[in-house]
Amino acid sequence: MEMSTSMDKEDKDIKKEIEELEKLIEEVKKQNEEEKKKQKKNMRSNGQIVVKINLGAEYSRNMFVNLLINFLVNLLVIFVLFNIINWATITSDVYILLMALILTFYEELYRRYLIRYFMSIVVFSSGMIFFLMNLLLFYFLDLVVFQRNLDFNDHWYPIVFVMFLQIFRTIVRWLYIKGMSAFIVWKSKKKGGRK
């Protein structure tokens, strides 16, 4: 009889503990639901959803590193495009170097200016303003700056050239970002393995 009362007592204790655990679980569920409701209300009350788009398409936060990488990419793409396809007659490769240098500084200046003061135009045009600014630059380089040292073979070629330039630079930029993110992951795994 003593065993049955001790077992009954243990059963009652276990039942009480289970009931207490169930109550705690219900309280936690209610708290979670309340927190979710608060978060939803906060999101609705703010009404702002933040979407970050890097329209400046920077390679680095450091301005000098960004300029250097941008110059190298511009030089590479311009050199490859002029040597693969006969877009223009160029008297010397120095003009390709100058073109890349001018394009790099020109782009940096107008991108910063447009993004800072005329962001609505950049967003509204979906970045087409950058294409038009580069197009103006290459027509200006062809007709005014380099005159007979750079001569596009057709009046349509600067348009096509700038289109290809933008496309290839986007591809190179994408490859650079993927390569850098893979490098960072590899480096963090390497550091993690040393510990």
Image: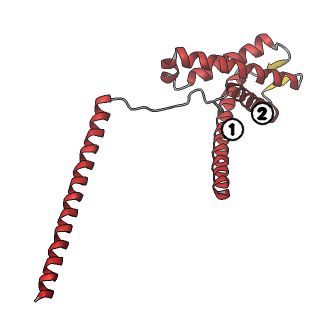
Please determine whether, in this image, residue 9 is positioned above or below residue 108: below
Residue 60 in the image: state x and y as whole percent: 65, 32
Q: Return the residue nearer the eye: 2 or 136.
A: 2
Residue hosting label 1: 172
Residue positioned 71% across, 16% down in the render: 139
Marks 1/2 in contact by CB < 8 Å: the verdict is yes
Residue positioned 25% across, 53% down in the render: 28
Residue hosting label 2: 76
Q: Return the residue nearer the eye: 13 or 36.
A: 13
Residue positioned 49% across, 23% down in the render: 123
Q: Is residue 14 left or right of residue 74?
A: left
Task: Work out which quarter of the rendered image holds the C terminus and state it.
Answer: bottom right
Disc 1, SS: helix
Q: Return the residue nearer the eye: 180 or 11.
A: 11
- Per the rendering, the mark at residue 110 is none
Q: CA distance from mark 1 to mark 2?
A: 10 Å
In the rendered picture of this protein, how many numbered marks are placed on residues?
2
Disc 2, SS: helix
- Which quarter of the figure has residue 8? bottom left
Residue 183 in the image: state x and y as whole percent: 67, 47
Task: Work out which quarter of the rendered image holds the N terminus and state it.
Answer: bottom left
Residue 151 in the image: state x and y as whole percent: 81, 19
Amino acid type, callout 1: Val
Outermost residue to the bottom:
1
Residue positioned 85% across, 23% down in the render: 90
Amino acid type, callout 2: Leu
Please determine whether, in this image, residue 138 is positioned above or below residue 49: above
Q: Mark 1 or mark 2: which comes first in sequence?
A: 2
